Image (cartoon, helix red, strand yellow):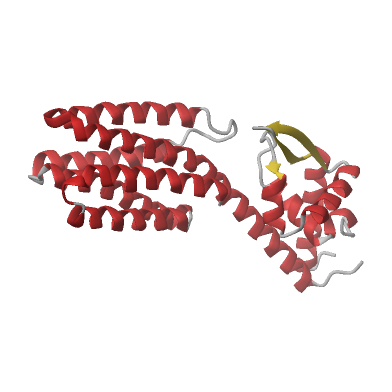
Amino acid sequence: MDAPDDIIHQPVRLRVMAALNALPEDDDGIEFSRLKSLTGATDGNLGAHLDHLARAGYVEATKAFVARRPRTTVKATAAGRAAFARHVAFLKSIITGGS
Amino acid sequence: MSISPNEAQAMLADIDDVVADVKQSRIYRISSGVLVLWGAVVVCGDLLALVAGRWTGVSWIAVDLIGVAATFWMLMRGPKNLAFPWRYVEAVALFAAFGFVWSLAIGGMRPRDLEAFWPTLFMFGYALAGLWFGRLFTIIGCGLTALVVAGYFWAGPYFNLYLALVNGGGLMLCGYAMRRA
């Protein structure tokens, strides 16, 4: 790979994908509020970035009501995991001088 | 778009930080349920000790067994992709064996000493666990140990009530706090 993934490259989206990718594939995902604290983003900002990732097919969000409160859970798709792995490989290749 | 090696290094370091945070929070999430459960067990055990008289030892064994069974049930229902934490179970068993050797065979402790010994023994375990699994465990272990020792010296005849509130209630509160960490 000789170019970064433009969608993942943005810092907030990179952190989102890193967090989601850290979970096993069959995990239920990470709650929106937890992602907010992991990325340091505001509600609106994180929502926009998640939309961006979802449009690319990298993440999927599930909305549910728990104790009458809306809860959004986000998880990485297989395509998202593959894209993240490629992006990390690209970053590593820059350090090792392979790109 | 061009990325310098320094920028790439910084991004990879950022990724490592996030991954460490996620793994840490998974450990806290699983542990928080166990903490709340044992907080409830301790509250029940200490309140029963107030009324059980000479059956205090038996009542403690009964509530502890219920606690152990509930812990196994809780851990087996844990995240489906997580192996059953046998090492955790072995560590707790070792601490319990150590405690029994001292409290039954060697120590010659009075009931009040035993009431202080058992919680501080397991809090020591939490403090040690914090060295590997996150400093919250160490803070909880050291903080509750200090409170139990304070009660041992100053709670007078209300020591069991104090333990139910401070040790049991403290564990439950710490469990809830850990879930949000």
Write the residue at 81% across / 64% down. Answer: A98
Q: Quadrant of the C terminus of chain A?
A: bottom right
Is B152 positioned to the left or the right of B29 in the image? Answer: left
Q: Is residue A2 above or below residue B76?
A: below
User: Where residue B159 sits: x, y (%)?
Assistant: 21, 46
Question: Residue B52, can we see it?
Answer: yes
Q: Nearer the viewer, residue B159 or A18?
A: B159
Q: Nearer the viewer, residue A55 or B13?
A: A55
Write the residue at 83% across / 43% down. Answer: A58
Write the residue at 69% across / 39% down. Answer: A29
Write the residue at 55% across / 35% down. Answer: B82
Residue lying at the far left in this picture: please name it: B108
User: Where residue B67 sits: x, y (%)?
Assistant: 35, 30
User: Where residue B113 sits: x, y (%)?
Assistant: 15, 47
User: Where residue B26 sits: x, y (%)?
Assistant: 57, 45
Is A17 positioned to the left or the right of A28 in the image? Answer: right
> For residue B81, which quarter of the picture?
top right
Question: Residue B98, can we see it?
Answer: no
